[in-house]
Image (spheres, rainbow, N blue to C red):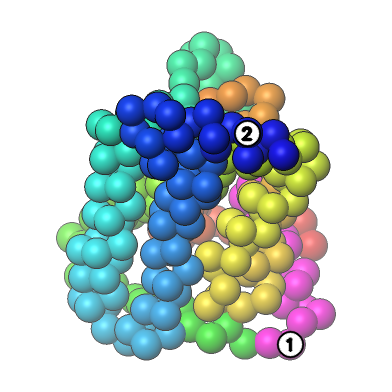
Amino acid sequence: MNSLKNSAADAATPNGFLSTVRAQVFLLALLCLPLYLNDFANIYLKDSWVWWYVVDLGVVKPFQLGLIIWMLARGLARGRDFGLSRIRPAAFILVAALMTLGGTVVLMNGTVFLNRIIALKPLGGYPAVPDPVFRWVDLTLDIGLVALLEETIFRGYMETVLRRLNFGTFKILLVSSICFGLIHWSNGVQSVIVTSLVGAMFMGFYLKCRSTLPLIAAHYLIDFIFFSMLVPYTWFLYI
C-alpha cells in the first residue's frame, strides 16, 4: 500500500510517471537487462574477442552509462541513489581493503570447492585477448567500467528501489545478491552461487558505509587479480 501511495504522490511531480516507484522498477530493469543478455556473447562470441568487445564496450556499457546520465540529468535519480556518496578516506581504504581480500578469498575458494562437487561445465566463457595492448585496455577500462556499473546498479540503485518497495534488510540482501549472481549465468551454476555470496557481502558493507565508492575500488581489484593472473592465486586459496 505504501509503495502505491508513493507512486500516486510522485505522479504529481514535474517528471510525472517517471518519478513513480513503478517507473523506478522499470528503469532498474533496463539497467540490469543488458548484463543478463550480454552473457549470450560469452556463449556465441567466446572465440571472437573483437566482436565480443564490440558488443560489450560498443553497446552494453554505453547504453547503461547513457541511461544513468540521462536519469541524473532529468532529476529522476540523485548521485546518492547510486551510492555515489562521500566517504572518509580512512573508511574508504578500510572497506576497499576488507572487501578486496574477503571477496577474492570467497571467489577463489568458493569456485574451487563448488567445481569439486558440481560437475557442470559452463555454457560459455570470456574470450582470450591475444593483442597485448588491448589486453591492458581490458584490464583497465573494461573491468573499471564493470566495477563502476555493477556496483552503482546492483548495490546503489537496487537498494534505493527496493527500499521504496518497502523491502527490509534481509530481503534486500537476498534479492540483490541473487540478481547479481544471475548476471554470471553463462559461467555456470558454480559462478552464480559464488558471485551471489560475494554480492551479499558487498551489499552488507554498502548498507553499513552507504557509499559504493570503496566497493567500486574493491570490485575492480578483485577482477584485476582474477583476470590479470599477475597475482598468484595461491595467496588466496586455502582449500
Q: Quadrant of the C terminus?
A: bottom right
> In the rendered view, does 120 fall on the left or right side of 71?
right
| Residue 101 circle label | none
Badge 1: how crowded within 10 Å, few (<14), some, or many (20+)? few
Q: From the viewer's perspective, is 158 left or right of 125?
A: right
* Residue displayed at 62% across by 87% down: 121
Q: Position of residue 142 (x, y in %)?
A: 31, 54
The front one of 215 and 138 is: 215
Total residue callouts: 2
Task: Tell me if residue 48 is in the magenta stretch.
Answer: no
Location of residue 41 with respect to 229 vertically, above or below: below
| Residue 124 drawn above or below residue 10 | below
For mark 2, give the secondary structure. helix
* Front position among marks 1 and 2: 2
- Residue 119 is labelled as 1
Left or right, residue 147 beside residue 55: right
Q: Earlier in the sequence, mark 1 or mark 2?
A: 2
Q: Position of residue 188 (x, y in %)?
A: 61, 78
Q: Amino acid at mark 1?
A: Ala
Label 2 packing within 10 angstroms: few (<14), some (14-19), many (20+) = few
Give the magenta-colored segment's residue range: 103-120
Residue 102 showing in the rendered view: no
Image vertical order of residue 76 relative to residue 174, above or below: above
Does residue 57 appear in this view? yes
Amino acid type at mark 2: Lys
Q: Nearer the viewer, residue 213 or 59?
A: 59
Give the quadrant of residue 134.
Answer: bottom left
